[in-house]
Image (cartoon, rainbow, N blue to C red):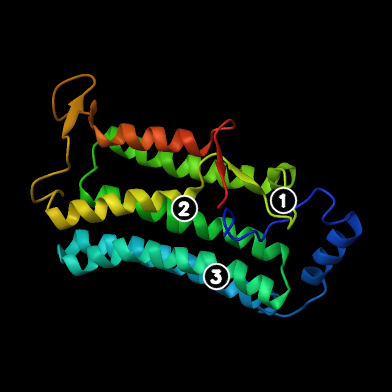
């Protein structure tokens, strides 16, 4: 994955301009309708499975909203964790096969955004965070995750490396940390603290207007705002273990 599996270039001089041009030519010199598929490496297919897990999580959340069948809800909660496993193993596979690709580097971040950005926020909406300001906070979290992944792609070569070439720390909170929030949502689901049962813990506050209006927001959204701010922080450095 973009933040954990180290599939990105590890140093500013890790690729010369000539090698980058050679890497790009592999996409230009193939012909045919499915030529892009032939450019996939095994690690890229593992990365795509991360995106598959995130997408199925979103659809499972939607099915729960349609049917109120909690089996779909538990599927939606479990699938981001399955995505994390694929996210971990894509880097392992790339190192085992001793191959990487520019396509794989971008797939990493796109899959992470689905599994650890969109899917968890869809779960939050599904479980009851549905006011206007709630959706603003959820959208802000996704966008901060998007910005964090884009910055990682652009600046990973500037982060100090250890003797093995791995970055010594993360700048900002990695987006897979959102699985911690999914864990919280799983506990709330088990306890019945969701919409249609006992409701989201800590309730709502009204920032303006009348209760029930557009100025109402769930208190837990302030946690998400702080979480999103930590992802795009330039000064927060998370040591790698």
Q: Position of residue 136 (x, y in %)?
A: 35, 35
**Residue most toward the left?**
197
Q: Secondary structure at mark 1?
A: loop
| Residue named by callout 3 | 89
- Report the Cα–Cα distance between label 2 and label 3: 14 Å
**Residue most toward the right?**
18
Q: Determine the image quadrant of residue 205.
A: top left
Mark 1 or 3: in front is 1
> Which residue is rendered at x = 81% and y = 48% of the image?
12
| Residue named by callout 2 | 176
N-terminal label among 2 and 1:
1
Mark 2 or 1: in front is 1
N-terminal label among 1 and 3:
3
Q: Secondary structure at mark 2?
A: helix
- Report the Cα–Cα distance between label 1 and label 3: 21 Å
Query: 206 and 170: which one is in front?
Result: 170
| Residue named by callout 1 | 162
Q: Position of residue 223 (x, y in %)?
A: 33, 35
N-terminal label among 2 and 3:
3
220 relative to 161 in the view: left or right:
left
Q: Determine the image quadrant of residue 69.
A: bottom left
> Which residue is rendered at x = 87% and y = 62% of the image?
19
Q: Determine the image quadrant of residue 217.
A: top left
Q: Is residue 205 above or below residue 77?
A: above
Q: Secondary structure at mark 3?
A: helix
Query: 195 and 89: which one is in front?
Result: 89
> Which residue is rendered at x = 77% and y = 69% of the image?
27
């Amino acid at each position: 994955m973009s933040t954990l599996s180290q599939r990105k270039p590890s140093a500013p001089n890790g690729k010369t301009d000539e090698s980058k041009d050679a890497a790009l030519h592999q996409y230009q010199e193939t012909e045919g309708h499915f030529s892009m598929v032939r450019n996939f490496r095994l690690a890229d297919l593992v990365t795509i499975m991360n995106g598959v897990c995130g997408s199925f999580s979103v659809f499972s959340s939607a099915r729960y909203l349609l049917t109120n069948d909690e089996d779909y809800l538990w599927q939606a909660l479990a699938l981001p964790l399955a995505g994390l496993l694929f996210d971990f193993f894509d880097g392992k596979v790339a190192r085992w096969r001793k191959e990487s690709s520019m396509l794989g580097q971008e797939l990493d971040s796109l899959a992470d955004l689905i599994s650890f950005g969109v899917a968890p926020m869809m779960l939050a909406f599904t479980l009851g965070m549905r006011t206007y300001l709630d959706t603003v906070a959820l959208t802000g979290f996704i966008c901060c995750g998007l910005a964090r992944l884009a910055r990682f792609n652009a600046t990973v070569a500037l982060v100090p490396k250890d003797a093995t070439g791995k970055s010594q720390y993360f700048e900002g909170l990695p987006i897979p940390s959102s699985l911690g929030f999914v864990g919280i949502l799983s506990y709330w689901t088990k306890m019945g603290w969701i919409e249609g049962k006992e409701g989201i813990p800590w309730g709502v506050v009204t920032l303006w207007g009348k209760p029930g209006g557009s100025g109402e927001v769930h208190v837990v959204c302030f946690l998400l705002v702080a979480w999103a701010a930590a992802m795009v922080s330039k000064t927060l450095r998370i040591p790698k273990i």
